[in-house]
Image (tube, rainbow, N blue to C red):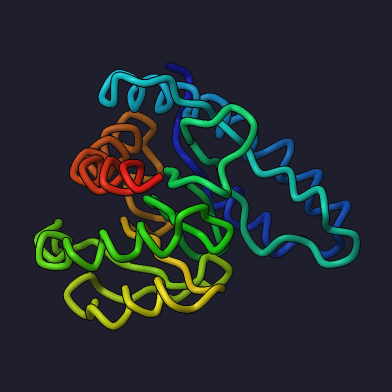
Amino acid sequence: MSFQGFTQEDFNTFHIEGLEERMTAIQERIQPKFQEVGSLLADFLAAELQNEMFLHIAKHARRTVNPPQDTWLAIADNKRGYKKHPHFQIGLFDDHLFIWLACIYELDHKQQIAQAFSDKYEELRKLPNDFVVSLDHMKKPSIPLNELENKDLERFRDVKKAEFLIGRHLSPTDSRVTDGDAFIETVKETFKPLLPFYQVALNQR
């Protein structure tokens, strides 16, 4: 595999002024890496789940003025799109890399999925202790998994715009980010314990 990891230059992409200039850098620096690691990880997830999985790379096509603050790849079991489905996500802000099982606000059957996660609250809390949770994929901050409360899952269920993403944040200087092989292994280690919850979500559709 030729993937050598993500570099500081990749993260610095989000300091470039201007929509066109930043998008060019995303397309030239980051998206080829997403294509490579995403294809490999889609195959990994397909083998684990015994189901075909499809890679989607964010195009940011709707943006006309403001340059994106982050960019990502998504892996879902739907060929046409991922936003309406539970999916796996890897992406970059300027100050961290994220690895998620993501259920965002466009999700079909969101209330049922949220209730199923709420019912599994104690099992969620037993995931690795360095896992974090985001309740809004547009914002950088996350909360440590040990601070997750069931009311957060109830909010995800009851509030239309509420979201639930769970996984890891990694620093740009972390060797698990800068070393290609270590990165792939870290993503696999992150996704594996999330697979049962992905299945729980799929079962609500």
Across and down, in percent, residue 92 comes to 53, 54
Is the residue 71 above or below the residue 131 in the image? above
Q: Is residue 51 above or below residue 64?
A: above
In the displayed structure image, the side of residue 149 where residue 95 appears, left or right = right
Q: For residue 44, which quarter of the picture?
A: top left
Total tally of numbered discs in the picture: 0
User: Residue at position x 63%, y 58% from top?
Assistant: 12
Q: Which corner quadrant holds the C terminus?
A: top left
Q: In the rendered view, does 21 fall on the left or right side of 178?
A: right
Residue 199 lies, in percent from the top left, at: 28, 40
172 or 83: which is nearer to us? 83
Which of 32 and 15 lies nearest the eye of the viewer? 32
Residue 170, quarter of picture: bottom left
Q: Quadrant of residue 117?
A: bottom left
Viewer-nearest residue: 39 or 118: 118
- Residue at left 59%, top 27%? 79
State left or right for residue 59 relative to residue 191. right
Give the x, y percent position of residue 197.
Answer: 25, 48
Q: Nearer the viewer, residue 22 or 136?
A: 136
Where the N terminus falls, by quadrant? top left
On screen, 70 above or below 136? above
- Residue at image point 44% right, 44% down: 87
- Identify the residue shown where x is 52% and y is 41%: 74
The x, y position of residue 7, in whole percent, is 52, 45
Relative horizontal placement of residue 17, taking residue 39 as reference (left or right): right
